[in-house]
Image (tube, rainbow, N blue to C red):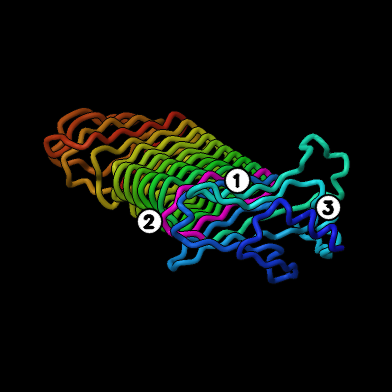
Amino acid sequence: MKKLFSLFVLGLLLTNTTFAQDKETPYFVKTYKSSEMKNLYVRTSGGGIAVTGMAGDEARVEIYVKGNNGITKLSKEEIEDRLKDYELSVKKDGETINCIAKRKNENDWGNWRNGLSISFKIYSPEKISTDLVTSGGGITLKNLTGNLNFTTSGGGLRLQDLGGNVKGRTSGGGIHINGCRDMIDVSTSGGGIDADDCKGDIHLSTSGGGLVLKNLDGIIKATTSGGGVRAENIKGDFVTSTSGGSIHLEDMMASIKASTSGGGIDADIKSLGKYLSLSTSAGSIHVRMPMDKGMDLDLDGSRVRIPELKNFSGRVEKDRVRGSVNGGGVAVSMDANSGGIYINE
């Protein structure tokens, strides 16, 4: 037992560490002064990564070890025996904390039943740069500001109260974002995206689910090929598209470009931005919008129904409306190849 324990700790720096393993406490804990942690580098192939920014003088790294299904609880002896096949280390290199958990022989998956799920839970300064990669679990980031880069192919992303340059990728789960700001660029091919209360330059992309967006402000581009789009209370510039569902927009106060080849469009426009462009090849367009502004209209569908236009100069036909309202101004275009266009009905 003592020998096995010694073999394990050779790969770890023992200063300010404690060891435990039960349902509520981590297997390994290492503490640092917050001023020592400016950058965070994490690699694990069998578990998740969680980083939370905290005020105070202390930062710490916690390691949680479970069976390869991420659930099985192992004894201390079983963990120490299996860890002989792993490289597991937490080391400081200048202002960077390096956390590594991987098999020594990454091509040896024949003995997968004895594999481990090794997760990192890290409490860091609020201002930090991250480089995080896991192929076996989700990533959770909270209350951080800086250059935040993170990737997983085996789980979802949960992001809360982040700022700076935020860039995340996953091919194995959904994305949940709340209270983030500045530069946000996240994508998934394995789930939907739910974003709420965010502001800044925002890029959201998924090919595996729908988009649910609420209370966003800024330059926003959100695309999906695997589901519908639901957006509420959006301000700024908003571009969205889907080939896998319908688009529903509510309480919009933005410049909008929205297109779908997988359903119809229903939009509630509270105030017009610099432009409004809606198009679908698989349904109709229903819009509620103010008509008292200067607009240049270009509406094309199998049928176009619009209230009586005042101060209008142009052409109104059964399937086409083109011309200027109130002297012209905001470019308003709608195209429904296989459906109608219905405004304020």
Mark 2 and mark 3: Cα distance apart in space: 47 Å
Q: Would you call the spot at circle 1 few (<14 residues within 10 Å), some (14-19), or many (20 or more)?
A: many
Name the foreground residue: 288 vs 73.
Answer: 73
- Count up the numbered dots: 3
Q: Which residue is mark 3?
A: 82
Element type at mark 2:
strand
Whether residue 226 is visible:
yes
Residue range highlighted in magenta = 124-142
Q: Amino acid at mark 3?
A: Arg
Q: Residue at x 52, y 41 (%)?
A: 187
Tell me the quarter of the image containing the N terminus.
Answer: bottom right
Q: Would you call the spot at circle 2 few (<14 residues within 10 Å), some (14-19), or many (20 or more)?
A: some
Q: Would you call the spot at circle 3 few (<14 residues within 10 Å), some (14-19), or many (20 or more)?
A: some
Which badge, 1 or 2, is on the more N-terminal residue? 1
Element type at mark 1:
loop
Q: Which residue is mark 2?
A: 215
Q: Amino acid at mark 1?
A: Gly
Name the foreground residue: 186 vs 239.
Answer: 186
The reply to whether discs 1 and 2 touch (Cβ–Cβ < 8 Å) is no
Please tell me whether residue 2 is drawn above or below residue 274 in the rendered image: below
Name the foreground residue: 327 vs 307.
Answer: 327
Q: Residue 45's x, y, as percent?
A: 70, 45
Determine whether, in the image, residue 249 is placed left or right of residue 47: left
Determine whether, in the image, residue 178 is placed left or right of residue 30: left
Q: Residue at x 47, y 35 (%)?
A: 260
Q: Nearer the viewer, mark 1 or mark 3?
A: 3
Q: Which residue is mark 1?
A: 191
